[in-house]
Image: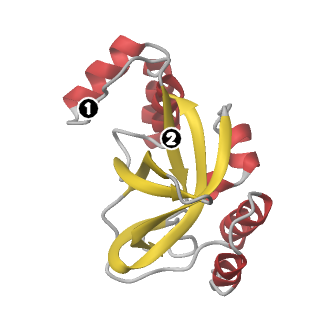
Amino acid sequence: MLRILLKLSSLIARSWALSWCLDRLHGIRLVGPPGEDVWYFAYGANMHDSAFRGWRGMHPLEWRPGRVRGYRLRFNLEGHPRGRAAPANLSADPSAEVCGVLYNITRRDLVRLNATEGIPWSRYRPLWLDTEDISGNTLRAATYIARGNKDDGKPSLRYITLLREGARAHGLPEYYIRLLKQVEHAR
């Protein structure tokens, strides 16, 4: 069923008017013209080019290492196969920060990215927050967050490898790469 909804989302994402109507129906506001540049903060598999550029088909205008303060990286979502894969998520934590990749894309690309993430039918919801690039500039960026489980699971080896390689390839801080290396994967 989810595959059918993802396919439907990708078809709808090709039409700005249909995307606007669908998002509005699910309480998601689509504001601004389709060609406007926006920032997207990737903290999970989308940090890796094979996921973001390859599988999701995104063509960022530019990218920068970045971070968001006040959130912690968690693996508290159910993945597939159940119990053996836990995707990344953000959880509010005033004393923490999450590093990731800031991608500059068009609002139309963001709508297509939403569709590949299963929005509005999946557990993820778009969230706009203040991020900081490597130079200390504040950028308003969209990201995804979900209501997660109380306890964290373990990501698959394939998934955590995407995060580790994406972080390294995009020049994220060494302390954060070490943190990702310490995440135990499912067996």
Tell me: residue 171, above or below residue 130: below
Figure quadrant of residue 173 = bottom right
Left or right of 173 in this view: 145: left
The total number of labels drawn is: 2
Tell me: residue 37, above or below residue 178: above
Q: What's the amino acid at mark 2?
A: Trp
Tell me: residue 35, above or below residue 87: above
Tell me: residue 156, above or below residue 67: below
Q: Is residue 4 visible?
A: yes
Q: Position of residue 76 (x, y in %)?
A: 42, 73
Distance from disc 1 to disc 2, alpha carbons, whole Å, reads 16 Å
Figure quadrant of residue 103 = top right
Kindly identify which residue carries mark 2.
Answer: 39
Residue 29 image label: 1
Residue at 79% x, 59% y is 169
Secondary-structure class at tag 2: strand
Left or right of 143 in this view: 166: right
Which of label 1 and label 2 is nearer to you? 2
